[in-house]
Image (cartoon, rainbow, N blue to C red):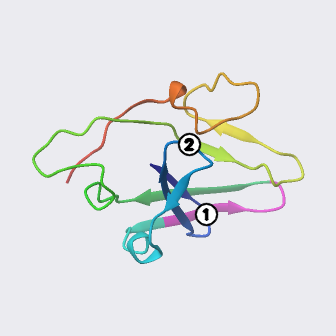
């Protein structure tokens, strides 16, 4: 499962075994994701923002009530469409070209409950 968030509030969620064969989730379900975006800086030099999102793991098929959830993932930023492209990842990605969908470089995620 892949969640992609943008500073403009856009979200894409897709599921699939590889990047070529993904099924995108219904926009009506995606629109139910509570999120807050705070733009810290938006200039010609740089953009910075914070994003907070609440994911209903059961709604996306990642959890069942009363069961422990073990997830792997990474947090990334990709600016491949910029004049000077940039790529950033919380966990190192050991591929020749940036590949944010390489599960071999994911690490355990701790999901905080309410």
**Residue at far right of view:** 83
70, above or below 56, in the image: above
Dot 1 falls on a residue whose secondary structure is: loop
Q: Position of residue 79 (x, y in %)?
A: 75, 50
Dot 2 falls on a residue whose secondary structure is: loop
Residue tagged by mark 2? 18
User: Along the line of sight, which residue is nearer the eye, 21 or 79?
Assistant: 21
Left or right of 50, for residue 35: left
Is 62 in the magenta? no
Q: Main secondary structure of the magenta part?
A: strand
Q: Residues within 10 Å of mark 1 (few under 14, many from 20)?
A: some
User: Along the line of sight, which residue is nearer the eye, 52 or 95?
Assistant: 95
Left or right of 28, for residue 7: right
- Give the magenta range: 37-45
- Residue at image point 34% right, 60% down: 54
Q: Position of residue 47 (x, y in %)?
A: 71, 57
Residue 44, by quadrant, is: bottom right
Left or right of 97, for residue 34: left
Residue tagged by mark 1? 7
Q: Residues within 10 Å of mark 2 (few under 14, many from 20)?
A: few
**Residue at far left of view:** 66
- Residue at image point 19% right, 54% down: 114
Disc 2 from disc 1: Cα separation: 25 Å
């Amino acid at each position: 499962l892949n969640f992609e968030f943008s500073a403009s509030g856009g979200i894409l969620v897709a599921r699939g075994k590889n990047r070529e064969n993904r099924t995108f989730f219904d926009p009506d379900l995606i629109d139910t994701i509570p999120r807050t975006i705070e733009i810290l800086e938006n200039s010609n030099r740089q953009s910075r923002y914070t994003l907070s999102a609440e994911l209903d793991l059961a709604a996306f098929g990642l959890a069942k009530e009363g069961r422990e959830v073990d997830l792997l993932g990474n947090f990334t930023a990709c600016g491949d469409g910029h004049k000077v492209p940039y790529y950033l990842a919380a966990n190192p990605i050991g591929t020749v070209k940036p590949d944010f969908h390489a599960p071999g470089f994911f690490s355990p995620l701790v999901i905080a409950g309410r």
